[in-house]
Image (cartoon, rainbow, N blue to C red):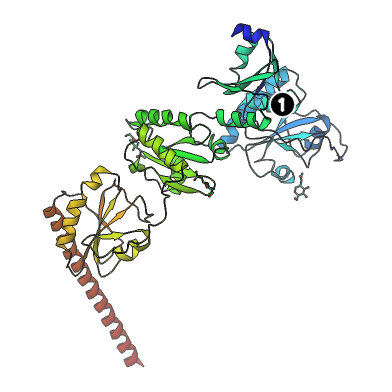
Amino acid sequence: MKELLISLLVVAWLCGTAAAAANQAQGNANTKVKKTKTVAIKEEKGVLVLKKTNFDQALRQHKQLLVNFHAPLSGDSQSLSIEFTKAAEQLKAESFKVHLGVIDVSSEKDLAKELNVTGFASLRLYISGDKQNPVICPVVETASSIITWLKRRSGDRAELIKDLAQAESFITVEDVVIVGFYKDLEKVVLFKVSTKSEVYEASSDASKEDLVQFIRVRQMDLVTEYTGMTSAKILSSVITNHLVLFANKSEENFGEDYEVFKNAANAFIGKVLFVLIDTNEHKNGRILEYFQVRAVETPIVRMVNLTDNVQYQMQSEEVTSDKVTAFCQIYLDRKAKPKLQSEPIPKDWDKHPVKELVGSNFEKVSFNEERNVFIMFYSPWSKACRALFELWEKLGKVYEKHESVVIARIDATANDIKILLMQRYPALMFFPSVYSEKAVPYFGDKTIEALVEFVENQVELAKDEKAKEEKERKKYIEAQKEMEKKEKEEL
Ligand SMILES: *[C@@H]1O[C@H](CO)[C@@H](O)[C@H](O)[C@H]1NC(C)=O
Ligand SMILES: *[C@@H]1O[C@H](CO)[C@@H](O)[C@H](O)[C@H]1NC(C)=O
Ligand SMILES: *[C@@H]1O[C@H](CO)[C@@H](O)[C@H](O)[C@H]1NC(C)=O
């Protein structure tokens, strides 16, 4: 390693979160600013404190001014501001040519409005006093990535590495670092803190696009956990097939499932991006809702095609290496079955003892005033569900000819069902003929006797309720009549 590094000329550049930055606004300084008396602008820890009264002056005085629009109530903005101050202190120590300033958008509302600042936690670089066309800094999270971005913008695009010590310190500077080994460009190595380095062998016809693609793909970890920090990186990835593991990180089996998932990722680098979503993180509530994932069903593995937003469900109870690998391959071969709102209604759905429901006829059948409907919500690949099918068939036969009882089942993984089910599949729910929206869950024994007894009780209850309802209705009607009569008499 040592010889290689010293004998070759080594050029390296950092690859932080800074994207290929926009170079637009540079140079056209055409904003005239009013001449006012200048008082030195207050500075805190190397950061200029900017206000409506001194902003124009700051633009005049500093050819390059990086401004942090700070929102004190936003957590993201708070953490960015800490890093921003760190960056300012370091840049000041280096006498770097860009000055850093902060505007508190909660107290400087007018100025923020004038500058058309809407999003928070944002950094803008004002060049040559041009108020209208600042360069928006891409999303950054650390002091070092702010510095990297600024330095790259101002021309120090790659750092020349001359010896091993410099190389060793350089590759620890960021999570991801790219080093090119030159005589003619022969090799590019991507160093990642979290994993081993990756080598790109540049052939004579390698293009810049190939290299960029290599970096974009390889800079991601094998599995990226979805968080506020990583969501943008995940959604803007060049890889548009995302395999998502929904799992509860606090659960005992999590470690095992995660290892299996991660190991499977190796074979699909560049084709499928592996993502983890923790179902035990309350901040993920909305994304779980979006995917219609129930925390009690985890672990769940789903493929998402980001181009058309179609989802595919891995049909397995366990996360095994074989299952994950096969599922990815089937999907890539375009042979996977997409997840739909509803399966088509089966031709003979109501011809058997157990009625087959799907998304599109579920509500009509279950929320029916005339019928008591007992439904098994199942997952076709769950052993516990399959073990119950025979018993359910028996129950169906018991009530095949009954006037008001319907025994049914629905594949809850292939159909979107708009009711809240708290228990794991198989979930058994009774929808009584009155108030069918008050479904009753069944937790009793899985025997035909116990099930029949439950149904009979529920049917009686429903009858009583119905009779009560009928009585109430009659009473109401009579009261109405009475009133009308009285009114007439009074006339
Ligand atoms: C803010 O937006 C308005 C309307 O688009 C524009 O006229 C104005 O020049 C903008 N101001 C700045 C400072 O960019
Ligand atoms: C995740 O697992 C932990 C430990 O078993 C449990 O306490 C917690 O309720 C689970 N979270 C969810 C959302 O199910
Ligand atoms: C993802 O969706 C796009 C748009 O529908 C389609 O062209 C592409 O083939 C899909 N990818 C896979 C692997 O199915």
195 relative to 352 in the view: left or right: right
- Residue depicted at x 70% and y 41%: 108
The residue positioned 38% from the left and 32% from the top of the image is: 249
The N terminus, quarter of image: top right
In the rendered structure, the answer to whether residue 34 lies left or right of residue 311 reads: right
Q: Secondary structure at mark 1?
A: helix
Q: Quadrant of residue 466?
A: bottom left
Q: Residue furthest top?
A: 3
Which residue appears farthest toward the left when viewing the image? 449
Q: From this viewpoint, is residue 247 visible?
A: no
Q: Position of residue 383 (x, y in %)?
A: 25, 43
Q: Does 199 appear above or below 396? A: above
Q: Decide which of 186, 364 is in the foreground and name it.
A: 186
Nearer the observer, 160 or 229: 160
| Badge 1 amino acid | Arg
Q: Quadrant of residue 73?
A: top right
Q: Which residue is mark 1?
A: 152
Q: x%, y% of residue 321?
A: 37, 32
Check mark 1 vs ligand 1: CB closer than 8 Å? yes or no: no
Quadrant position of residue 487:
bottom left
Most foreground residue, 153 or 61: 153
Q: Is residue 152 visible?
A: yes
Residue 255 pos. (x, y %): 36, 28
Quadrant where the C terminus is found in the figure: bottom left
**Residue at the spot 32% in from the left edge and 37% down from the top edge:** 318
